[in-house]
Amino acid sequence: MKGKHILYYEFTDALQNGECPICAIIKKRRERYFEHILSEQVNDIGFRKELRSTHGFCNFHTYMFYSFRKPLASSIIYEDLFLTEIEFLKKDKIVPAAKECIVCKIEREAEKEALEILQNYLKDSEFKKIFLDSKGLCVPHYKKAVLKMGNVPKWFKDFHIKRFEEIAKTLHKYIDAQNVSLGEKRPKLTREEELEWKEAMKTFAGLEGLKW
Ligand SMILES: [Zn+2]
Ligand SMILES: [Zn+2]
């Protein structure tokens, strides 16, 4: 255990909680950033300058910030953004918002670091054991991992294909259970199987707001 990267523990903790570890690391980093700006950074000149340079947060992260419902912090930030924008508009300078906002950038870096952890520990036996006992990665992160690594160990590929096949199989079972024409042959569903559609959608899309 000694000498492992701190992110390794975040990664394995998420696996043990049944979450896609890469999504979980991005989510944590995103939340930590908002907590940080809400607690102390709102008045920081550097932060506001950076936010001005990207013309605010992207649409997704704006609504995330909105969901914290912080009237004073929002007023300080948006007064600043409006005044900056008005200056541009007076000069007929139409500047599109940046493709990537501050939080998008933080998330992209967190994702890169998490993918590196995965790559660095794939041959570690303890890591493999935790992985095989988890729900693995979401579909987008499995695809990103394969793209990053070129080829992945056979166990890693087999594990994900089997997991995704099981999801599809459970969805099929659910569909059969709704089919009255099957009569006695209609399968009985567990509570978990009844909710599989949720798991399927989340696994297929990954974290809310995840960028490809
Ligand atoms: Zn994911
Ligand atoms: Zn963003």
Image (cartoon, helix red, strand yellow):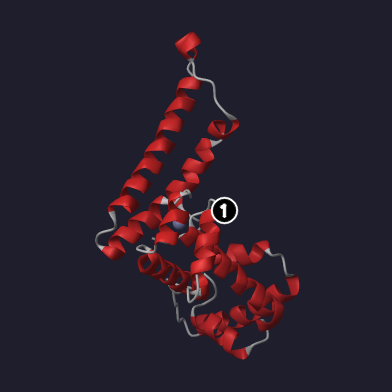
Q: Is mark 1 within 8 Å of ligand 1?
A: no
- Is 30 left, or right, of 4 in this rendering? right
The vertical placement of 61 against 17, above or below, is: below
The vertical placement of 149 against 48, above or below, is: above
Where residue 78 sits, quadrant-wise, is bottom right
Judging by the rendered image, the residue that carries numbered circle 1 is 17
* Identity of the residue drawn at 50% across and 13% down: 180
Residue 8 shows up from this direction = yes
Percent of width and height locating residue 118: 40, 64
Q: Residue furthest bottom?
A: 45
Q: In the rendered image, which quarter contains the C terminus?
A: bottom left
Percent of width and height locating residue 6: 52, 73
Where residue 152 sits, quadrant-wise, is bottom left
Percent of width and height locating residue 83: 61, 82
Residue closer to the observer: 92 or 118: 118
Residue closer to the observer: 211 or 21: 21
* Identity of the residue drawn at 36% across and 47% down: 159
The vertical placement of 53 against 115, above or below, is: below
Q: Amino acid at mark 1?
A: Asn
The vertical placement of 37 against 144, above or below, is: below
Residue 137 shows up from this direction = no
Q: Residue furthest right?
A: 72
- Tell me the crowding category of disc 1: few under 14, some 14 to 19, or many 20 or more residues within 10 angstroms, Cα based: few
* Identity of the residue drawn at 60% across and 63% down: 64
Q: Secondary structure at mark 1?
A: loop
Where residue 80 sits, quadrant-wise, is bottom right
